[in-house]
């Protein structure tokens, strides 16, 4: 799609999208609906999730609509820990584009390299929509493609992103994540859910058919991964990142 296409395409109805997306029951369905809206506007891939600006180990994806090769590169190269977009979220609180990042002489070399790699994959422009959720945690919808982002398009996509993110984060605890949330294994997530229900190590062991010592080990691993000092903090962080529901 050429860079002028998005300027001549009618912007989608945000209210209609909000109504429709809330009838969908899985993140995959929501992702497909969002992709169908942004594709005519020049964006062909996106991600949606929750970030912790103080502890990147806590970052959690709700939807990853990336080509497999990019997902593999992003997670295995270490870029997930030094993503320039995440770095910029500490100082940028309104939607911003990759063009704005490139124009900023403060962008790190790693950030420049990351944007160049994205461009090599055909993504010359991106739009990042931060969605503050309290404290140093922040929701995020990030899109990439080849387009021109006008102020009207930016504002409209920000509305669509709010609709998508607010609904998807209510689904992932039940329906699952595209990557292990904050690096937690499925068994560790199960244990965190049981901790949130007030279960002791013995209660977790009985529920899962494992030894109490094994249950304790899973809980301790989850605490380390979520940088939680206590079981109460473990529950609070897991709920804030939508990893579990209360």
Image (tube, grey):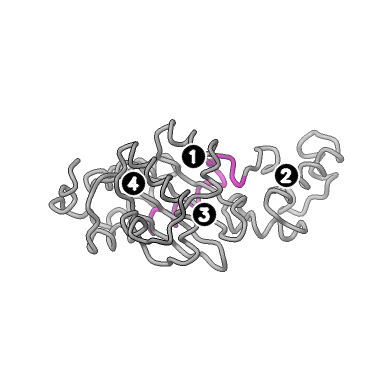
Residue 74 numbered mark, or none = 1
Q: Earlier in the sequence, mark 1 or mark 3?
A: 3
The extreme top residue here reads 69
The extreme left residue here reads 8
Q: Secondary structure at mark 2?
A: helix
Magenta residues (range): 162-182
> Pointer 3: residues within 10 angstroms few (<14), some, or many (20+)?
many
Q: Earlier in the sequence, mark 2 or mark 1?
A: 1
Give the quarter of the figure containing the N terminus. Answer: top left
Indicate the position of residue 160 as horizontal and vertical percent values: 33, 56
At 56% from the left edge and 48% from the top edge, which residue is drawn?
Answer: 81
> Pointer 4: residues within 10 angstroms few (<14), some, or many (20+)?
many
**Label 1, label 4: how far apart the Cα atoms are:** 14 Å
Residue 48 numbered mark, or none = none
Circle 1/circle 4 CB separation < 8 Å: no
Q: Secondary structure at mark 3?
A: strand
Residue 144 numbered mark, or none = 4
Q: Nearer the viewer, residue 212 or 184?
A: 184
Indicate the position of residue 235 as horizontal and vertical percent values: 69, 56
Q: Earlier in the sequence, mark 4 or mark 2?
A: 4
Q: Earlier in the sequence, mark 1 or mark 4?
A: 1
Residue 50 numbered mark, or none = 3
Residue 191 numbered mark, or none = 2
Indicate the position of residue 146 as horizontal and vertical percent values: 25, 45
| Residue 181 as seen in the image, left or right of residue 154 | right
Q: Nearer the viewer, residue 90 or 205?
A: 90
| Residue 244 as seen in the image, left or right of residue 46 | right
């Amino acid at each position: 799609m050429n860079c002028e296409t998005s300027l001549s395409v009618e912007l989608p109805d945000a209210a209609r999208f909000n109504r429709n997306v809330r009838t969908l029951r899985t993140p995959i369905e929501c992702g497909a609906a969002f992709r169908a809206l942004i594709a005519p506007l020049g964006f062909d891939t996106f991600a949606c999730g929750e970030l912790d600006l103080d502890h990147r180990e806590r970052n959690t994806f709700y939807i990853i609509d990336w080509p497999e090769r990019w997902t593999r590169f992003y997670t295995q190269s270490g870029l997930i820990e030094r993503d320039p977009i995440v770095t910029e979220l500490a100082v940028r609180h309104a939607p911003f584009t990759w063009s704005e990042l490139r124009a900023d002489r403060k962008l790190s070399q790693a950030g420049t390299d990351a944007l160049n790699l994205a461009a090599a994959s055909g993504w010359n422009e991106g739009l990042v929509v931060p969605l503050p959720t309290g404290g140093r945690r922040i929701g995020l919808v990030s899109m990439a493609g080849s387009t021109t982002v006008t102020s009207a398009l930016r504002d409209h996509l920000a509305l669509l992103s709010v609709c998508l993110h607010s609904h998807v984060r209510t689904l992932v605890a039940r329906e699952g994540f595209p990557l292990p949330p904050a690096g937690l294994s499925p068994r560790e997530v199960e244990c965190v859910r049981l901790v949130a229900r007030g279960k002791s190590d013995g209660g977790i062991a009985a529920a899962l058919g494992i030894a109490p010592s094994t249950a304790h080990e899973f809980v301790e691993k989850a605490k380390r991964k979520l940088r939680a000092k206590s079981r109460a903090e473990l529950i609070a962080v897991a709920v804030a990142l939508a990893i579990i529901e209360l």
